[in-house]
Amino acid sequence: MSIGRAALTRVCGKPVGPIGYGMLGLTLPAPFPEVKRDDALNLLKKALDQGANLWNGGIHYGTPDANSLHLMRHYFEKYPEDAEKVVLSIKGAFSIKTGPAGSPEAIRASVEEAFGVLGGEKTIDVFEMARVDPNTPIETSVKVLAELVKEGKIGGIGLSEVSASTIRKAHAIHPIAAVEIELSLFTPDPLKNGIMDTCHELGIPVIGYSPVGRGWLTGQFKKVEDLPANDFRRTHFPRFKAEAFDQNRKLVVAVEKIAERKDLKTSQVAIAWVARQGAIPIPGSTNPERVEMNSHLSELTDGEMLELREALDTFPIAGERYGGAHEKLLNA
């Protein structure tokens, strides 16, 4: 279950640290908490200073006028010297309302939008289709992305939430720079469905999003009432629903025991577990202290990894990851 990984890997030929930074929470519109631009820039700077130089954002992370790309432009206008230090992965060709758009025209439009917003302040090292378009063969989508690499619009091609067979089909058309998947103690599925094995076989770096289970593995939630009634997780994600809460809390308790024994936070154990699978975890936080803490990789012994595997077997997770229409787009 644990293969370990080198302390340093490369994405598109550029070195990245063992932990990256997920930018989703920095630009979400209301009703999510607002993060002021200067605060967001400071969080990004702190992450980079701690070695977390793989930054993962999306065109749909916010509004058409204020998303990850706009934030990146502001950051690199302020810190142009950091442009070569950061490996930027941007998801696009996707709309929260209408879903994935993998046609050649849609992909080109998405990349051109990203390219234009960045305004030359930073290159797009990896462009990811946020989800696979069920109406467009993956080979068709990858072919146009390969053209965009050749044209210098993007550095490499990323895939997100794809199956092992899709990875192989895409990689046969053009080398894939990275595959982004949800990977955590709450979502160990890629270890069982061939995704991780395929990426390791083909030498494709794996980016693990939601490594702390959307906050489950921070240890903050001991009862469902700890989440505000209007919290997006409580209202939209099945694993935070009242009927699943007590079952899912059992795994958290098991992880907390290891964390307490090692004088670590529960999230540090969770992130270390993802890294031990051979992935680059990309925790996201708007708390400066947590950003700093999350950026440092803790160590887990083989015995502790075995203990966590037994906990996974003993306390199966209740509830789907997303539920509804979005669930159907996973592992496509």
Image (tube, grey):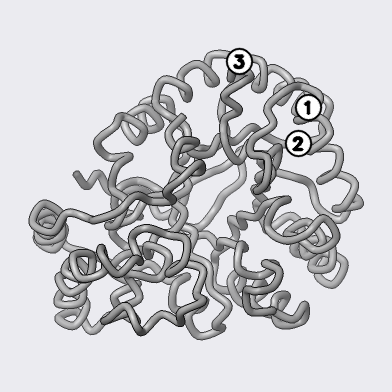
> Which quarter of the picture shows residue 255?
bottom left
Q: Which residue is mark 3?
A: 139
Comparing 129 with 244, the one in front is: 244
Q: Residue at x 60, y 15 (%)?
A: 139
Element type at mark 1 = helix
Amino acid at pointer 3: Glu
Q: Is residue 34 left or right of residue 120?
A: left
Comparing 266 with 76, the one in front is: 266
Q: In this picture, is 74 found above or below 93?
A: below
Q: In this picture, is 144 found above or below 86?
A: above
Question: Which mark is in front, 2 or 3?
Answer: 3
Asked if the residue under mark 2 is in contact with the one under mark 1, i.e. CB atoms within 8 Å, the reply is: yes
Amino acid at pointer 1: Leu
Distance between mark 1 and mark 3 Cα atoms: 14 Å
> Which quarter of the picture shows residue 273?
bottom left
Q: Position of residue 75 (x, y in %)?
A: 79, 68
Q: Which residue is mark 1?
A: 148
Q: Earlier in the sequence, mark 1 or mark 2?
A: 1
Distance between mark 1 and mark 2 Cα atoms: 6 Å
Asked if the residue under mark 3 is in contact with the one under mark 2, i.e. CB atoms within 8 Å, the reply is: no
Element type at mark 2 = loop
Q: Position of residue 180 (x, y in %)?
A: 50, 43
Q: Which residue is mark 2?
A: 154
Amino acid at pointer 2: Ile
Q: Quadrant of the N terminus?
A: top left
Q: Earlier in the sequence, mark 2 or mark 3?
A: 3
Question: Which mark is in front, 1 or 3?
Answer: 3
Q: Residue at x 30, y 54 (%)?
A: 319
Q: In this picture, is 206 found above or below 21?
A: above
Q: Position of residue 94 (x, y in %)?
A: 68, 40
Q: Earlier in the sequence, mark 1 or mark 3?
A: 3
> Which quarter of the picture shows residue 233?
bottom left
